[in-house]
Image (cartoon, rainbow, N blue to C red):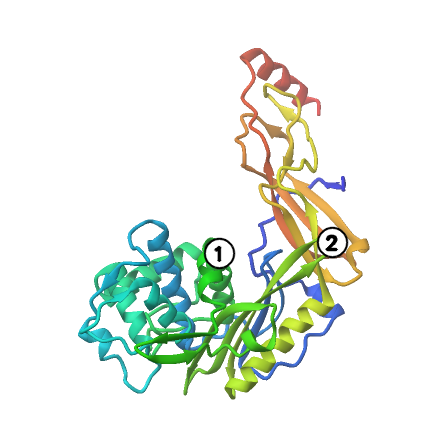
Amino acid sequence: MKKFLAKALLVTASLFSIAAATAQSLPAPTIAAKSWLLYDATSSQVIASQDPTLKIEPASLTKIMTAYLVFSALRDKKLDLNQKITVSTRAWKVDASSSKMFIDPATPVSIGDLLYGLIVQSGNDAAVALAEAVAGSEEAFVVQMNRENERMGLKSSHWGNAHGLPSAENYSTAQDLATLAARLIADHPDFYKTYYSTKSFTYNKITQPNRNRLLWLDPTVDGMKTGHTEAAGYCLISSAIRPNGTGQRRLISVVTGTASDQVRAQESLKLLNWGFLNFDTVRLYAKGQAIATPEVWKGTQAQIKIGFNRDLYVTLPKGAAANLKPALERKDPLVAPIAENSKIGSLKMMLDGKAIAEFPVLALEKVDQASIFGRAWDSIRLMFK
């Protein structure tokens, strides 16, 4: 764990950097979908994908962003679950042939019920009502949706409405949708647990089942969302959490453009099972663990602890952990002042000579600048280094 390479810092790999070595050593399954992606939320790694950046119509997968913004408003006390709102004519009159919760302008409805209508029943009327509750109008809400895209780094997505009915302004990718799903689960775990695993919901004396068949087929699946239009085909984002050593790991699958409700369920389950059966997620370092203590120049201390501000995991084929080798790269010399959590270098995890993951290495403590005499002395020392 102490191999140091005297090279310049590498650019940190993005969240969705696919491990080529992993893909070559274990072929991905054949999935009957337009595009798909399998993501390990524990390690923040993509395990496998097909056409992950293909532009698609997200259909009701759009409602994940809608739910995210509503959850954020609830967290920030801008809304209350028990708060009742009056249903607008616009929400009531949303496409009658599409999925609806069947809210009515004559009957005020709570934010909590609207969320069940949005997530369990996939109600387009609920989506409009919630958008208006958060932002005053659906148009203003869409501005917030696209602003959230920028914050999350969803560079290939754009939203034109809150529900996902066909619009030229509504598009995304499997990659962006996986990011969005992972962010909702991480940022709003309690809301996710409450709503996304619910199998049915009754409103206005009408009971509708959750369209995510995997909630009945696999007890480890605890969400996420279905989507369907004629152009989009049948889409499904699924998430499952299963044992991983002494802990647990979560996988998220995104499957778009399948031929039927049944196919999207069976292909999603195939993908999840393949990921859990063929890969392990290994903890490399604990949050705050010093992976090295390199020398510091012109500082109030001679060394600095470097590591990570979170537990660090990596996903790799089963049995491959013993062959994993770390390579730490940093730009020397390290000169004070150095702020806590500032980037010091990068750690590449190598498997069979190929990098399967790369992580930014941070300063675990701050180092202040030394006195003028200390800085002068180190300047002289550096001349002879």
**Residue 310 position within the rendered picture, expressed as x and y whole percent measured from the top left:** 59, 44
Question: Which residue extends farthest front?
Answer: 205
Q: Nearer the viewer, residue 335 or 18?
A: 18
- Residue at image location 66% in from the left, 62% down from the top: 19
Q: Which of 120 and 149 is in front in this view?
A: 120
Indicate the amino acid at tag 1.
Pro
Mark 2 surroundings within 10 Å by alpha-carbon count, few (fewer than 14), some (14 through 19), many (20 or more):
some
Q: What is the distance, in whole Å, between disc 1 and disc 2 at their CAs?
A: 32 Å
Q: Which of 184 and 166 is in front in this view?
A: 184
Left or right: residue 55 compared with residue 133: right
Q: Which mark is residue 350?
A: 2
Indicate the amino acid at tag 2.
Met
**Residue 356 position within the rendered picture, expressed as x and y whole percent measured from the top left:** 69, 58
Mark 1 surroundings within 10 Å by alpha-carbon count, few (fewer than 14), some (14 through 19), many (20 or more):
few
Give residue 216's quadrant in the image: bottom right
Mark 1 highlights which residue?
189
Does the image show residue 161? Answer: no
Q: Nearer the viewer, mark 1 or mark 2?
A: 1
